[in-house]
């Protein structure tokens, strides 16, 4: 039985989520009405700040299912009570990310064309099925967990979700890996890198959401499980940092990529902001600092785990900005060995400054994920405490 204060808190939180979502929709309408001239995007930088938000949510949506996978696929019973929340967050984050992605395309009214006409030589067409399929698999997975008659199939559904999310993240990384029109992207390493990043970002999101729910009386993670998830977060963060290093070292092996790496890593040729975000934002604050908080023998408390999760998420945004925006800002080398210049600024570094509507659209996607999570928690027994209460009522 919910108390009046709980009802009031729900409506306040839901109103906040609806407000953030509405602000994002209003920003998208403003950009649709006035054109992308009101954004910082140009003919060279066509994926701006909204794509940073969208890719983060889509990749994190895959990784947040890791908690459910550890329980259902690998048989760790301590994780199973938290699997429903894991699946809910997957659906919510994916919906928020796709909302931003669709509204940032410039012609969201043409989404029906993308949904009915497919070019299977394009990885974008593959992802239409991967994203919608991920939602369907997650819903079926939740059904097998909630419906007692189908509990015996929960392991099979969890395995399907595990395989699908690996394929989905491979597809997201392949969007960039197959893109030959940008020197920064074309690399076979991007698929495994995105898988590692998804595991780190998804675990960080789960720990952050769980901490907020605990503060609101929604059930706290057992200390032992929190420490295990914290160690997993540390391992995934270290693996991500390692693969990012391998990616850049691989680029440095090729002579044609040296100038790009100097642009990103050293800030040469106008890449100062990207070098700062990479080293200070991603490496130091987003990777090294969380590893210290998680593995230092005198740390590892609840507050340290939450701080590490927040830093990993901030580092994710820093890395995505460098990867997505920096990869487009660097001039494409069309004729290797020759200098190219024209009135169209060929061979020049592109300037990009995010605009307020872009930021608000990205925040609106986070708001949509927040709203869906809030409503889901209200309607169904996603938390272990709720499930226990429901069992007591039968």
Image (cartoon, rainbow, N blue to C red):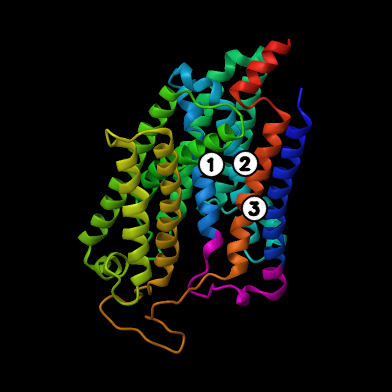
Between the C-alphas of marks 3 and 1, the distance is 13 Å
Residue at 44 percent across and 52 percent down: it is 314
Whether tag 3 and tag 1 are in contact, CB under 8 A, the answer is: no
Residue 207 place in picture, x, y as percent: 48, 36
Badge 3: how crowded within 10 Å, few (<14), some, or many (20+)? many
Q: Quadrant of residue 3?
A: top right
Residue most extreme to the bottom:
343
Residue 49 on the magenta span: yes
Nearest the viewer among 141 and 381 is 381
Residue 89 place in picture, x, y as percent: 58, 37
Nearest the viewer among 242 and 112 is 242
Residue 346 place in picture, x, y as percent: 41, 82
Magenta segment: 30-50
Q: Secondary structure at mark 3?
A: helix
Badge 2: how crowded within 10 Å, few (<14), some, or many (20+)? many
Q: Is residue 267 left or right of residue 101?
A: left
Q: Quadrant of the N terminus?
A: top right
Q: Is residue 152 left or right of residue 30?
A: left
State whether residue 128 is above or below residue 78. Answer: below
Between the C-alphas of marks 1 and 2, the distance is 8 Å
Q: Quadrant of the C terminus?
A: top right
Residue 344 place in picture, x, y as percent: 46, 85
Mark 3 sits on what residue? Answer: 99
Mark 2 sits on what residue? Answer: 92
Mark 1 sits on what residue? Answer: 61
Give the mark toward the camera: 3 or 2: 2
Answer with mark 3 or mark 1, whichever residue precedes in sequence: 1
């Amino acid at each position: 039985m919910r108390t009046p204060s709980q009802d009031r808190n729900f409506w306040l939180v839901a109103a906040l989520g609806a407000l953030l979502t509405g602000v994002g929709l209003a920003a998208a309408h403003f950009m649709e009405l006035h054109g992308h001239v009101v954004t910082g995007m140009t003919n060279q930088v066509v994926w701006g700040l909204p794509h940073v938000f969208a890719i983060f949510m889509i990749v994190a949506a895959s990784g947040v299912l890791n908690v459910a996978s550890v329980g259902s696929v690998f048989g760790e019973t301590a994780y199973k009570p938290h699997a429903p929340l894991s699946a809910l967050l997957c659906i919510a984050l994916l919906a928020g990310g796709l909302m931003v992605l669709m509204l940032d395309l410039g012609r969201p009214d043409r989404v029906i064309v993308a949904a009915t006409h497919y070019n299977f030589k394009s990885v974008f067409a593959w992802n239409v099925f991967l994203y919608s399929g991920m939602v369907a698999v997650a819903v079926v997975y939740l059904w097998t967990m909630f419906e007692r008659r189908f509990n015996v199939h929960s392991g099979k559904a969890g395995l399907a979700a595990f395989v699908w999310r690996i394929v989905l993240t491979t597809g997201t990384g392949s969007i960039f890996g197959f893109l030959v029109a940008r020197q920064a992207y074309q690399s076979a390493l991007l698929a495994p890198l995105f898988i590692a990043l998804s595991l780190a970002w998804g675990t960080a999101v789960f720990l952050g959401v769980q901490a907020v729910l605990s503060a609101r009386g929604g059930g706290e993670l057992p200390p032992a499980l929190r420490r295990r998830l914290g160690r997993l977060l540390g391992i995934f963060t270290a693996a991500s940092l390692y693969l990012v290093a391998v990616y850049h070292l691989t680029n440095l092996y090729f002579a044609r990529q040296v100038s790009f790496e100097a642009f990103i890593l050293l800030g040469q040729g106008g890449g100062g902001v990207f070098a700062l975000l990479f080293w200070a934002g991603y490496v130091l604050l987003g990777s090294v600092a969380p590893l210290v908080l998680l593995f230092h023998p005198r740390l590892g408390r609840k507050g340290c785990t939450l701080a590490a999760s927040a830093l990993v998420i901030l580092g994710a945004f820093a890395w995505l900005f460098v990867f997505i925006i920096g990869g487009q800002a660097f001039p494409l080398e069309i004729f290797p060995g020759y200098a190219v210049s024209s009135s169209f600024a060929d061979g020049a570094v592109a300037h990009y400054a995010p605009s307020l509507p872009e930021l608000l659209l990205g925040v609106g996607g986070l708001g949509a994920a927040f709203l869906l999570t809030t409503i889901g928690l209200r309607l169904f027994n996603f938390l272990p405490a709720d499930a226990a209460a429901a069992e007591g009522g039968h």
